[in-house]
Image: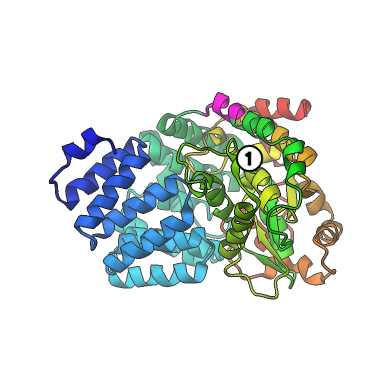
Amino acid sequence: MSIAQARQYQGKDARAWYDAGEAALEKRDLAAALDAYRISLKLNPRAGAAWVGLAKVMEANQQFSDALECLKRGAQAEPGNPTILSKLAAAHMGQGDVTAARAIYERAISQQPKSVSAHFGMGQLLEDLGDADAAAKSYRRVMEIDPGNAMALSNLLGLGRSVDITEETSKAQADLPHASDTNAALIGYGLGKALEQTKDYDAAFAAFHAANEARKRDTGTFERGFFDARIDAFIETLPSSFFAEREGWGDASQRPVFIVGLPRSGTTLTEQILSAHPACFGAGEMNVLTDLTTGTPDRLNDPQASWPTCAGRLTDPQLQDIGRSYQEQAHARAPQSARRVIDKQPLNFWHLGMVALALPNAHIIHCTRDIRDTGLSIYCQNFNPDQRWATDLSDIAYYWQGYQRLMEHWREVSGLKILEIAYEETVRDIETQAQKLLAFLELDWDPAVLSFHEQGRAVQTPSRWQVRQPLYTGSRGKWQRYEKHLEPLMTAARTA
């Protein structure tokens, strides 16, 4: 925080400093927000809101483990606050700890039966566990409390494969033309899924298109120049000679497995197959690697440093520490018997340079899929609003081309063990693909992997319903139903 800003709030109380933190966060001034929330806590350490504010700063900086700790402190400060409890439960879900999350949601609901955030969070958790009826009950409870809740309506519409949503579909069709951009995006994504179940594909695409146009107006468009510059920085900063000079550095463990690729490329299916093996543990989509990589400037004690340009300053002991820290956090719930622990955060493809330095013996499984199917599926999903590339078919094709360029770089220079798995081959011949996966991980064959759908574990991705079937093939070639709307993806496929 600047001297001028500090003087402005000199002598103010904890609430004023909290408000200053909120204002700074809205302007994306994370440093000022951090300072303001900390001062607010010094003045009143029993106010949970400032701890939540600190958690938001940590999340914005992709320091998810630190955010979880802040929320724990907030819940300790105000143990009866259902909003803080719901945020804490959601943070546990983000770390893959479903048991802790469920207990906290139940506690929040018992303390405040009309807590929208707690009922909604419980609905999401129940979806992840595959209980569509119970999830629908939670979402409908939200809508009883808050009839205009677009998020609950959207998620409920997405359950149309398992739940009767006739009434909600009519409501969405009536609400969509008059909704704000934020709500129109949510309603549109849900309505598209509902109409797709009725095989009205033109109407479904119109709903998806309305959702994406609203999201673009609400959050802005994809910055291709920044995207290209980021990829160029990796390629220029981390050539093959960089890794060769550091051969043997980092933590030597072979336990970590990273499943990467574009979202909707079969990463969840691949993880489910492997996690059915008794020697594997599926940790879900972890943010630990992102946290450690973006936290490199802190490790170097240089806030001006940035990744990857500062990579050359990391020593072998520091890289070993990063490798150990990753495993301590990402493998915390894995049993000792697990020889391989799987992190299936698809966008970890950005961080394979760090993996090559800190965990050089890790196994990388790269999932690929026809860009027409992948791109369509991305376009139809309500992704994090920060994923601005996902709201436009041309941007999706552009992102796909850039990601391919970066993956080719990692294959050529990193020295990592990388196996490519095509989604189409997996659904065509799952046993052969499963054998290939286990051989790559140096694990013996176990027929349990063919019964992956019988697991009771939580699945925190849009594929949660598909992977609970013996083998879901309905998404293969799905692009053909929407072909006339997909010219940017068609062009990308022709030029691949």
In the image, residue 332 lies at what x, y percent?
A: 57, 68
Q: Is residue 81 above or below residue 373?
A: below
Position in image of residue 384 (x %, y %) = 49, 44
Q: Nearer the viewer, residue 74 or 145?
A: 74
Q: Residue at x 64, y 32 (%)?
A: 231
Q: Is residue 226 magenta?
A: yes
Task: Identify the element where label 1 is drawn.
Answer: helix
State the residue in front, 111 or 126: 111
Name the residue beneath numbered marker 1: 312
Q: Residue at x 18, y 52 (%)?
A: 14
Tell me which segment is drawn in magenta.
Answer: 222-229
Q: Is residue 338 left or right of residue 73?
A: right
Q: Amino acid at mark 1?
A: Gly
Residue 111 drawn above or below residue 377? below
Q: Position of residue 486 (x, y in %)?
A: 65, 29
Residue 209 location (% of width, % of height):
53, 32
